[in-house]
């Protein structure tokens, strides 16, 4: 077995282990799980009201009609297969998506740079990113969005545009923000003088999107109600006026300033917390890597660097004009491309003997940072005094 394959297997196995261990904790809903797994359970029951914006859910819960239903359908499928509706069943698909996304970052590195070192470094960095790590352990939408966007991007680069369009449709069926990727693909197809291929991306994703809503129609809803639902979703995302203690602006996300507090369990001498936030060293060094990659692209005009930068900026910058409430986990789809830029820059350093010690130090700091914040990503109870360490490492406000 090639050394690269062995390292990749070890990385994927460790990624699976770190994501799946204690995945059933806590047993109750975490943050927005009051919407998505709850709705998935109602889908499983055949409750037609779970699809409707005009019906009222039980106290403390809400039907997740404001976003498309694919992630909830996948969670419902997991609960059906496992024949239970506990936290393990609804979180397990996210774990699978999380590990798959680590592999996809590796595969993208191979496709773009034709260099195993860059691919492995990028996948390692992405695997220890706290933001996507937490999302892959939580019954929310973002890890599904990230994974389907990566699948679409991979097949786009391989010039398999029909398959790319299918996965783009599945990404859109999790969150509409996948439309940012559609914009990138259209511009790239114009650049590559393949405008006829644009037709596939204008036809196939809407068909996939409509197919994802098949249970909506099978529960007795009409096409007119579907169109009204789309209108209600649009109104919600463009007109909702709300405030939240952990909301943040788009420009702050690469700086990792505002983690989102998902869960807390106060025990006798310890506290268990779950926060959604990036690995501090990955985000800070990765932001520098993005700037260096911009410089390198301007010098080399490399198509590979252009695609990495385009993936990063197209999935991030549109949030600058978004009218709605935002959170740092909206930055999740850009992190794979930040990881690729960082993997590329670190690989350049490894090629120079003088830089190798510094690169090893950077990698060690990223891994150490992940180890230090791991309890805050997974809800491991720790002494209250050590809670301050999180806010020191993460440079964010302490709510205690």
Image (tube, rainbow, N blue to C red):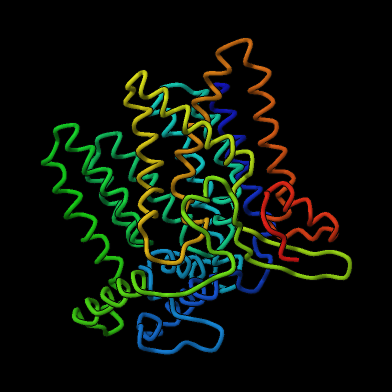
Residue sitting farthest toward the left? 196
Q: Is residue 187 left or right of residue 58?
A: left
Q: Nearer the viewer, residue 320 or 43?
A: 320
Query: Which image quadrant for residue 137?
Result: bottom right
User: Which residue is pictured at 72% across the width and 53% down the height?
Assistant: 391
Q: Nearer the viewer, residue 346 or 42?
A: 346
Q: Is residue 15 left or right of residue 218?
A: right
Q: Nearer the viewer, residue 171 or 191?
A: 191
Residue sitting farthest toward the right? 269
x, y (%) of residue 310? 35, 38
On screen, 347 above or below 176?
A: above
User: Which residue is pictured at 58% across the width and 28% down the height?
Assistant: 6
Query: Which image quadrant for residue 138?
Result: bottom right
Q: Is residue 50 left or right of residue 380?
A: left
User: Which residue is pictured at 33% across the width and 45% down the height?
Assistant: 152
All told, the count of numbered labels is 0
x, y (%) of residue 153? 34, 41
On screen, 45 above or below 152?
A: below
In what quadrant of the picture does the C terminus appear? bottom right
Query: Which image quadrant for residue 187?
Result: top left
x, y (%) of residue 120? 54, 29
x, y (%) of residue 274? 67, 61
Q: Nearer the viewer, residue 187 or 296?
A: 296
In what quadrant of the picture does the N terminus appear? top right
User: Which residue is pictured at 38% across the width and 28% down the height?
Assistant: 305
Q: Is residue 27 left or right of residue 98?
A: right
On screen, 22 above or below 307?
A: below
């Amino acid at each position: 077995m090639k050394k690269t394959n062995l390292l990749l297997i070890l990385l994927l196995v460790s990624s699976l282990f770190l994501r799946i261990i204690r995945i059933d904790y806590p047993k109750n809903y975490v943050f927005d799980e009051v919407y998505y797994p709850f709705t998935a359970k109602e889908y499983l029951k055949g409750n037609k009201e779970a699809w409707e914006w005009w019906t009222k859910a039980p106290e403390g819960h809400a039907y997740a009609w404001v976003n498309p239903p694919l992630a909830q359908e996948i969670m419902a499928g997991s609960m059906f297969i496992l024949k239970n509706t506990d936290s393990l069943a609804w979180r397990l698909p996210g774990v699978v998506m999380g590990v798959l996304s680590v592999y996809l970052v590796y595969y993208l590195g191979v496709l773009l740079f034709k260099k195993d070192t860059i691919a492995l470094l990028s996948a390692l960095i992405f695997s220890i990113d706290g933001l996507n790590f937490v999302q892959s352990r939580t019954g929310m939408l973002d890890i599904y969005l990230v994974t389907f966007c990566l699948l679409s991007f991979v097949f786009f680069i391989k010039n398999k545009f029909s398959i790319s369009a299918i996965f783009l449709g599945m990404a859109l069926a999790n969150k509409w923000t996948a439309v940012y990727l559609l914009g990138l693909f259209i511009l790239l197809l114009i650049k590559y003088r393949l405008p006829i291929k644009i037709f596939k991306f204008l036809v196939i994703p809407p068909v996939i999107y409509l197919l994802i809503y098949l249970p909506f129609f099978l529960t007795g809803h009409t096409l007119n109600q579907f169109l009204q639902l789309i209108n209600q979703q649009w109104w919600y995302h463009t007109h909702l006026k709300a405030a939240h203690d952990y909301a943040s602006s788009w420009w702050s996300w690469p700086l990792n300033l505002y983690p989102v507090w998902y869960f807390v369990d106060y025990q006798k001498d310890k506290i268990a917390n779950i926060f959604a936030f990036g690995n501090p060293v990955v985000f800070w060094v990765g932001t520098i890597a993005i700037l260096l990659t911009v410089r390198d692209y301007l010098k080399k005009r490399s198509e590979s660097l252009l695609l990495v930068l385009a993936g990063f900026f197209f999935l991030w910058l549109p949030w600058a004009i978004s009218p709605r409430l935002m959170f740092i986990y909206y930055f999740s789809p850009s992190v794979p491309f930040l990881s690729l830029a960082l993997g590329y820059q670190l690989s350049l350093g490894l090629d120079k003997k003088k830089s190798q010690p510094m690169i090893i130090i950077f990698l060690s700091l990223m891994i150490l940072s992940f180890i230090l914040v791991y309890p805050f990503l997974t809800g491991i109870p720790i002494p209250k005094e050590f809670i301050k360490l999180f806010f020191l490492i993460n440079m964010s406000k302490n709510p205690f």
